[in-house]
Amino acid sequence: MGTPTAAPPRAGGPPPPDAGPDGPDRPEGPRLPRLPGGDFARYLGNRLLGAAVSLLLVLLSAFVIFRVIGGDPVRAVAGDTPLTPEQQREIRDRLGLDDPLAVQFRDYLNQLFTLDWGTSYVSSAPVTELMWSRLPATLLLTGTALVLAVGFGVWVGTRAGWRPGSRFDRAQVGLALTLWSAPTFWLGMIVIVVFAVHLGWFPVNGMRSARGVGEGWWPQTLDVAHHLVLPALTMAAVVYAQYVLIMRSSIMDERAADHLRVARAKGLRDDLVRRRHAVPNALLPTVTLIGLQLGAVFNGALLTETIFSWPGLGLLFHQAIRVPDIPLLQVLFIFFAGTTILANLVADLLHRFLDPRVRSTA
């Protein structure tokens, strides 16, 4: 009997499933479906990992920096009261200042993660109580400054970029560059000399009048607003300059876009073309900058609050570093750095959500 042979495939028919140019092919296994949102999960994981590493470095820096700066914490606790050597050793033992650094770092991490942030050397009040009592003043100042900077900066930048080279554009660019290059402390001193000392329009420092303004929320609100004008304008001036320049550049890039030519060809007025078609696309870099500025504005409050004696976290940090009040300094340092890290994370996620080019390359 002869060996049976395989029947040849019919002409034009499909090849056998296991046939290949070099012999039988291994059948492919089932492909796993691609999970929706997998790219975003990977992108989010990378950003969260970077933020976590940055925060760990901040925690380590807060422990090291404020233990190598000058100053004696024992003197901060004692104030002007003279102490004997025995009393000084007792205070150092109570604060753990003579413990090994490894023990101090362990206690430091334990306090952070249990939200027991210790007490202030100067006031003997809990650090959390001091922070929460000063946080509303900082939020009021930074929030007002950011709203003013974004509102006027976007409007002025749009007008200047829509008519580049005009008299308005040249004047606003010159003003923005001047404000951007001016140091905050110098600008604050100029504002105080002009509007508080010579003209006498606004108070120099503080958040409320020492003599009182009477009963009721309305007089007190007006008093706080009166004190808020100079520090808010000083803080907003530098931030405003950045928004003007960024928005102006974005509008100038959009002016040559094809969809604007189509809008003009349809007969739309120039102001409608600018507001409905140019501004929404040009806002993307500005929105990203807002996220980045959330942390920078908090950090900028340090100088502004110190200059105007505004009773916020910035002034509290300045007062604590003169002592030094180590528990308070550590927590404030972590708070300011943490807000910057969080703001950068939010800006990255917002940028990816708004810009499809980032989503396609992420």
Image: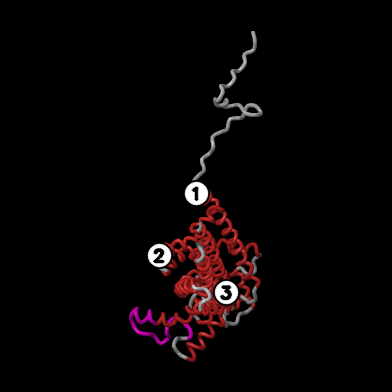
Q: Which residue is mark 2?
A: 267
Q: Which residue is mark 3?
A: 325
Foreground of the two, 155 or 210 = 155
> Which numbered dot is residue 127?
none
Main secondary structure type of the part rendered in magenta: loop
Dot 1: what SS?
A: loop
Q: Amino acid at mark 2?
A: Gly
Mark 1 residue crowding within 10 angstroms, few (<14) / some (14–19) / many (20+): few
Q: Amino acid at mark 3?
A: Asp
Q: CA distance from mark 3 to mark 1?
A: 47 Å
Residue 180's place in the image compared with 30, above or below, is below
Residue at (44, 88) in percent of width and height: 201
Q: Position of residue 55 (x, y in %)?
A: 58, 62
Mark nearer the viewer, 3 or 2: 2
> Which numbered dot is residue 37?
1
Residue 141's place in the image compared with 54, above or below, is below
Question: Magenta stretch?
Answer: 204-222
Q: Amino acid at mark 1?
A: Gly
Q: Position of residue 60 (x, y in %)?
A: 62, 64
| In contact (CB < 8 Å): disc 3 and disc 2 | no
Which numbered disc flags the more N-terminal residue, 3 or 1? 1
Q: Is residue 139 visible?
A: no
Q: CA distance from mark 3 to mark 2?
A: 66 Å
Q: CA distance from mark 2 to mark 1?
A: 41 Å
